[in-house]
Image (tube, helix red, strand yellow):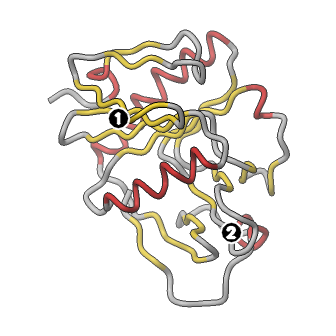
C-alpha cells in the first residue's frame, strides 16, 4: 500500500492512535501518523488469495487467527511509538492471549506478517518494516512482489529466501504444516 505522512504535529501516543476511526487507515511510525493509501485491485486480490490459503490452513488446524490489513501491531518503543499494519497477518493461539489496546493493537509483531509491494514502497521502508516485525518478536515476514513474481521469506535466523512461481512456500515452525505454490498466492499472469 502506498503511504503519506500527515502534517507535522506532536507525537501521537498509542492510546490516541487506537482511538482514531478505522477509515482512513494509518500506521504510527515513531509517533507520526502515516496514512495508508488505497491499494490497487491486484494488490487487494493478492492479499485475499493469501488470506484464503493461509486462513484455510489456520482454521482447519486451529492454529490461531489470520487478519487482512486492519490489525495493528506495536513494533516500536513506547515513546514515540510505532504500530504497523501488515497487508496480511497470522497470530498463533499462544499470542492471542496477549493483551491488546482498544481491541485493535497487539503488543509485538504477528507470528507472520505479509507485505505486498506497491509502487510507492521504497526498499528502505520495506527493510525497516521487516526489521521492526522481526525485532518485535515476529517469526517470519513474507514480501510479495507481484511484478517480479516473487515471494521473499525473511526470518531472524536465516538469510532471505527468494521464491518464484516454480517454488512452494512452507510455514516452517511459525505456520506448522502449511505449504502452497507461490503462484497460488497472487493473481494469474
Q: Name the residue under label 1.
A: 152
Task: Give the camera-side residue of 135 and 99.
Answer: 135
**Residue at 36% from the left image edge and 62% from the top image edge:** 124
Q: Is residue 154 above or below residue 79?
A: above
Q: Position of residue 170 (x, y in %)?
A: 44, 17
Above or below residue 45? Residue 94 is: above
Is there a contact, CB below 8 Å, between mark 2 and mark 1?
Answer: no
Q: Residue at x 34, y 26 (%)?
A: 185
Task: Give neighbour class at mark 2: few <14, some 14-19, many 20+ (Cα, 10 Å).
Answer: some
Which one is in front, 32 or 184? 32
Q: Which residue shows up at 65% across the image and 51% down it? A: 73
Quadrant housing residue 74: bottom right
Front one among 153 and 102: 153
Q: First in sequence: mark 2 or mark 1?
A: 2
Q: Where is residue 19 in the image (x, y as percent from the top left)?
A: 74, 68
Quadrant of image for the N terminus: bottom left
Dot 1 falls on a residue whose secondary structure is: strand
Amino acid at each position: 500500500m502506498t503511504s503519506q505522512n500527515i502534517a507535522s504535529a506532536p507525537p501521537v501516543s498509542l492510546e490516541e492512535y487506537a482511538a482514531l476511526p478505522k477509515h482512513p487507515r494509518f500506521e504510527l511510525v515513531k509517533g507520526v501518523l502515516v496514512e495508508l493509501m488505497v491499494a490497487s485491485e491486484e494488490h487487494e486480490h493478492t492479499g485475499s488469495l493469501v488470506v484464503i490459503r493461509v486462513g484455510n490452513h489456520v482454521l482447519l488446524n486451529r492454529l490461531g487467527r489470520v487478519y487482512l490489513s486492519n490489525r495493528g501491531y506495536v513494533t516500536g518503543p513506547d515513546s514515540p511509538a510505532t504500530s504497523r499494519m501488515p497487508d496480511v497477518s497470522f497470530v498463533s493461539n499462544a499470542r492471542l492471549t496477549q493483551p491488546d489496546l482498544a481491541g485493535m493493537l497487539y503488543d509485538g509483531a504477528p507470528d507472520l506478517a505479509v507485505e505486498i509491494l506497491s509502487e510507492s514502497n521504497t526498499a528502505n521502508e520495506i527493510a525497516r518494516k521487516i526489521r521492526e516485525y522481526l525485532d518485535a518478536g515476529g517469526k517470519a515476514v513474507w514480501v510479495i512482489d507481484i511484478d517480479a513474481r516473487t515471494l521473499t521469506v525473511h526470518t531472524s535466523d536465516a538469510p532471505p529466501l527468494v521464491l518464484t512461481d516454480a517454488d512452494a512456500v512452507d510455514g516452517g515452525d511459525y505456520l506448522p504444516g502449511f505449504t502452497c505454490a507461490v503462484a497460488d498466492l497472487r493473481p494469474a499472469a
